[in-house]
Image (spheres, rainbow, N blue to C red):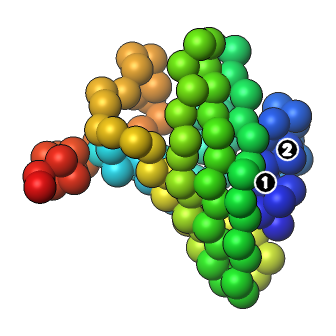
Amino acid sequence: MVGRYFATMVARDWDAFGEVLGADVAYEMPQTRELITGRDKYVQFNREYPGDWTAEVTRLIVDGTTAAASMNFTVGDQELVGLVYFELQDGLITRITDFWPEPYDPPAGREHLVERAPGAVDRLSTP
């Protein structure tokens, strides 16, 4: 299921991408303090993601109801390494947490899809 998640994401096949997600999927980005809840919003978030990007999975480990992956993500000339953690239930992905190298402010234009948690970045950046 997680392999299909990445394959459909890279292919930008958003209908097939949505099929691997639970209806109430939660997508969290601790560095930006953003949370997206629900399949439709999460698919739309990916559909609207700006720029010409590529993603390459470098490692994927699946163990029953959890999975973890590392990936190289490129947007324009910026290259990032991300870590992604998944929770699965009944053959669908129910929770996704993306970790990126450093906290950052989210780009404008996705406020209609996300909730913002106060203070999470501060907690992450405290030594």
CB under 8 Å between discs 2 and 1: yes
x 54%, y 46%: residue: 82
x then y, percent, for residue 101: 40, 42
82 lies left or right of 106: right
Q: Quadrant of the C terminus?
A: bottom left
Residue 2 position (above or below residue 125): below
Residue at image mark 1: 5
x then y, percent, for residue 29: 42, 47
How many neighbours does mark 1 have within 10 angstroms: few (below 14), some (14-19), or many (20 or more)?
some
How many neighbours does mark 2 have within 10 angstroms: few (below 14), some (14-19), or many (20 or more)?
some
x then y, percent, for residue 2: 77, 63
Within the image, what quadrant is residue 61 found in?
A: bottom right
x then y, percent, for residue 81: 55, 41
x 37%, y 27%: residue: 106
Residue 7 position (above or below residue 49): below
The local secondary structure at tag 2 comes to helix
Mark identifier at residue 16: none
Residue 91 position (above or below residue 120): below
* Three-letter code, disc 2: Thr
User: In terms of depth relative to the viewer, which is nearer, 79 or 50?
Assistant: 79
Q: Is residue 92 visible?
A: yes
The local secondary structure at tag 1 comes to helix
Distance between mark 2 and mark 1 Cα atoms? 6 Å
30 lies left or right of 45: left
x 62%, y 67%: residue: 68
Residue at image mark 2: 8
Q: Is residue 34 visible?
A: no
Within the image, what quadrant is residue 43 found in?
A: top right
* Three-letter code, disc 1: Tyr
